[in-house]
Amino acid sequence: MSLFPPRTFVDRAIYHDGQTAAARRIQVEVMPLEKLLVLHLDDGAKLTWPLDEVRQVPDLAGKDQLVLRRAGTGTERIIVANATDIGLIRATAPNLGRKDPVPQKGRILRWASAAVGAVALIIFVLVPVMADQLARFLPPEGEKALGDATLLQIRRALDETGFSELPICDSRKGTYALRQIERRLAANADLPIDLTVHVLDHPMVNAFALPGGHIVLFRGLIDEAETPEEVAAVFAHEMGHVEARDPTRIALRSAGSIGVLGLLFGDFAGGALVLFLTERLIQADYTREAEAAADAYAHSLLLAADLPPHGIATFFERLQDSYGDEPAILQHFLSHPEMGDRIAAARAATPAFFEGRQLLTETEWQALRAICDRY
Amino acid sequence: MTEGQGPWAAGKKLDTSTHRSPWPHAAGADPSPRVTPQDDARPRFSVPPASGQLATGFAGRRGRLFGLAFRTSLLTILTLGIYRFWMKTRLRRWYWSAVRPGGTPLEYTGTPIEKLLGFLMAVVIMAFYIGVVNLILMFVSFAVLADNYAAYLTSFLGVIPLWFYASYRSRRYVLARTRWRGIRFGLEPGAWGYTWRAILHWMVTILSLGLLWPRMTFALEKYKIDRTSFGSVRLHQGGKWTMLYRIALLPILSGLTMVGIGVWILYLDPIGPMVPDPFSDVRQLGPRNPERIWLLVLAGMVGCVGIVRYIVQSKAIMANHKTAGGVGLIAAPRTGRVLWIYSMGYFLTYLCMVLLMIPLLMLLGFYQLGFEPDFGEGPVSAIPEWVLIVAGLILYFSIFLTWSVLRHPLVTLPLWRHYAETLTITGEAELAQIRQRDRDEFSEAEGFAEALDVGAAI
């Protein structure tokens, strides 16, 4: 005893044979026992569709219709437009909602790996190589403009209100003290470009260099340092990056990479992506070699300026002692695995019985620490 | 099987490309009694179509569309954008099936997988172009001009030809995946021809201060339509470009009027000195007759209405001159209705966005007032920054979600419905003669358009 009568006619259906644009009125006979759908055309011809091959066309807007097709890529269609008939088809066709198997899995995999490979090749090989070459030929004015643009972008990204730029700290006495450090170091250096030094009013313990001789210290770094010599040590390190033009290379690289990554993610994450890359620029992931070179540069520069190279070592060690388990804070300075080596190298670079010349008076040092105070 | 186009052949393609999304309507006769009881009871036509004519119905409802758009957009965010190919496919299936010329729904047969594949192919080529070209432009702009705006501008100009190219290719893909009555549409290859024509027409239009705008509208539409087929039948765009001047006069004249008023109140009889003259010892006078600025605003508003009217009615006029053998179209969209849909739709969308933003902004404000001082100065404030970033991301994505979801039920759907319901197809008897055409594999799908974000509407 079947649940359904063996012969049920679905009336009011339209058949498109997929060969002509004619619309033919048909009667559909549902035969659940034989698992068949028999289409009676208007000219008396009959077509049979196995019930388990009947599929519905998905995501139909109007629920008053059901559009049927056969499994596979055929172009025939049956349109059923009566609620009772739709219910009958739904109850008898077992695989109505099944999807056709995805035909090109291998192809997708190949193209996906090609795309990933191409993007990786461009971001990790082509763009860096080109950026390194181009950075050499960028004239000083161009480098300066690139640095100005980047600094503005960073100040905007770090401003918490999102509507203006992070303020630059420039109390008169603090700026004077900062100039003292800059003069002392610059007098002993032979930089290809004039320095522009800023302190940004932000609690992050960080400092970085930008193209065009920009050196930027965050307020958090000055707060955390206990002596002017520690600030000078960080300063000298950043001068090493300026000397090697590391920031110019990074900025050109990010110019090439931003567009490519934006392409991958589509418009939906464009804004978030720019933020992310700005972050990358601040945290400037230089290579080990670049860091080591900047350290070496800093050591000899500090010695030439009668300043102790181990300033950076005491600074790092104190940070490690205080916040050893707080990776978020020290990511710039301490996330490098070779940090211990760098501390050791700074100590080794300091001659025994080293006696430096005073960098700042106590008053000047206090003025520098208060550089972000207004009035 | 692409057979010769008989003179009897009929088939129809109308570009009611609303909202930047060109999509085909098909028209044709239905020899059977009406199959479709419309599932919403809106009045269709005050006058029923004459014999041999087919009215176009629209069967979609806002609530269902909202649900579909919300689910698929959320999945898109959660999958970092991968699901967008599925989202696009499902939304298109929905919209296409909502449009029912002669009671038979259109069908969209594109698949997400082919879109993904096409996108991956485009990435391989575009990543190279964008990465290398951006870098060189950036370098040249800083090295030569010491400025990055030049780079943005050149970079933008460099993408324009690709944009036209991609939009034609994308149209070809969409038409190849559109069927009505089981018969495929198709568009001949011709993307480069379209690209250089479009660039030339744009240049001519700009050089003629907009006076030759109708010529561009008509020529580009004709290029596309004359290469479009429904099954075995080629479409034809009839008429002349001068027929569009009837509706182009209003925006052109208001534009010229605005220029005239601008010259008057800025140079001939200035409202007031824009920059105080340091060498003049005459004190700066107050503005003279500043109410004249309203003339400019008035002309601007008339111009905006004129532009919308031009966009809507130029489609209608050109649709009424499209033929395919014995089949034709009668399109009667109403400018006022379209203006109403746009203004109400976007107003409601923005209203919802603002309402949604209020709790989020309050949360942020609460956080800033209540928690941040506790961490005080010093290095621990690195933690609030992390929280801020997460909050910012949530804010960013909810704006994205609200915008991309609400646009569908509030703007796109009513527009499609209006264009569909004001469209009639003539010459239904010719339809039975139209044969199927071969499948256009077109494996690149709309990869380039996807990569360039062309036609982001659906």
Image (cartoon, helix red, strand yellow):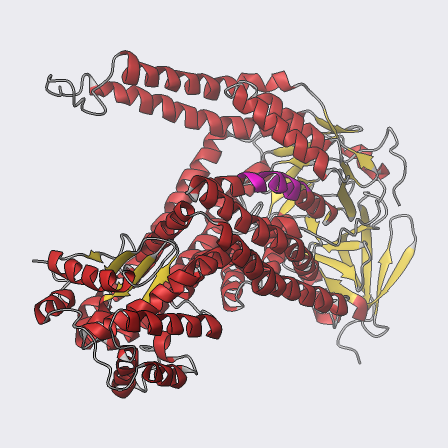
Q: Position of residue A257 (x, y in %)?
A: 52, 58
Figure quadrant of residue A91 = bottom right
Figure quadrant of residue B121 = bottom right
Q: Position of residue B39 (x, y in %)?
A: 58, 50
Magenta-highlighted stretch: main secondary structure? helix
Residue B457 can be seen, yes or no? no
Picture mark count: 0
Indicate whether residue A103 is drawn in magenta.
no
As displayed, is residue A284 above or below residue A339?
A: above
As displayed, is residue A116 above or below residue B161?
A: below
Q: Position of residue A319 (x, y in %)?
A: 27, 82
Horizontal side of B306 relative to B128 (left or right) equals left
Given residues B106 and A241, the one toward you in this image is A241
Q: Residue at x 35, y 76 (%)?
A: A333
Q: Residue at x 51, y 61 (%)?
A: B73
Q: Quadrant of the N terminus of chain B?
A: top right
- For the record, the magenta segment spans B157-168
Residue A257 can be seen, yes or no? yes
Horizontal side of A228 relative to B447 (left or right) equals left
Horizontal side of B358 relative to A37 (left or right) equals left
Given residues A293 and A358, the one toward you in this image is A358
Given residues B264 and A276, the one toward you in this image is A276
Q: Position of residue A302 (x, y in %)?
A: 29, 71
Horizontal side of A104 relative to A256 (left or right) equals right
